[in-house]
Amino acid sequence: MVSLVQLSPVELETPKGLVIFEGPVTDSYLDSLSMNKGLTNFRPPDRQKEALKIITNLPDGMIFIARHENEIIGYVTFHHPDDFSRWSKHPRVLEMGGIEVSPEWRGCRVAENLLKLAYSHPAVENFIVITTEYCWHWDTRNTGLDIWAYQKMLTRLFGKVGLEKVTTDDPDILEHPANVLMARKGKNVSREDIMLFEQMRFLRRYRKVANME
């Protein structure tokens, strides 16, 4: 695990109480906190907490959290792309793997402030940060939004921290027209790495050059 500087916590007064935004957090710190029972979008809260702890010990892995008192009410994760992903072949790509806020805390600007803190960390400037958003993960039931409204909400939210929609021939993205790939190019990423990323967005064109068959 690479030692990452922790940012100064940020406080936000909400109608439901004080929320603290902090990170990157350690696995031992996560152990000292409980998970809000509404954090079930990816897996049950206890299992999700274990997944977050694993990410804190990955190379360049980062977890930022929003907490009320000693309870985690939201989080966002960063890690290198999975080995089966095309993006794992790129040395400067970091994935924003997931962001979740408990339904009972939505409407309190938790996600917006969580992302603002996370993207203020100097480490993100060393990478092209991507997020692959698949509509089958979206919480349309609790939000009452259809998939197109949810996509618009996400792209607007992520756009506030510099992520932009980009096209790709990634089959997972193309599987549904609502799916979207977004990317943010860090200030310290070289021109060569940006060019490589642009080529890898369309793997069918790039495969022969990169020998990625």
Image (cartoon, rainbow, N blue to C red):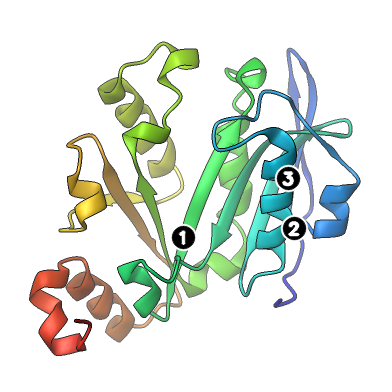
On-image quarter of the N terminus:
bottom right
**132 up-or-down from 55: above or below:** above
Vertical arrangement, residue 134 with respect to residue 189, above or below: above
Residue 77 x %, y %: 59, 52
| Residue at image location 31% in from the left, 70% down from the top | 86
Picture quadrant where residue 28 is located: bottom right
Q: Amino acid at mark 3?
A: Lys
Residue under numbered circle 3: 49
Label 3 neighbour load within 10 Å: few <14, some 14-19, many 20+ = some
Q: Earlier in the sequence, mark 3 or mark 2?
A: 2
Question: Callout 1, which amino acid?
Answer: Glu
Dot 2 falls on a residue whose secondary structure is loop
Q: CA distance from mark 1 to mark 3?
A: 19 Å
Q: Which of pointers 1 and 3 indicates the residue nearer the eye? A: 3
- Residues packed near mark 2 inside 10 Å, few (<14), some (14 to 19) or many (20 plus): some
Q: Which residue is mark 1?
A: 95
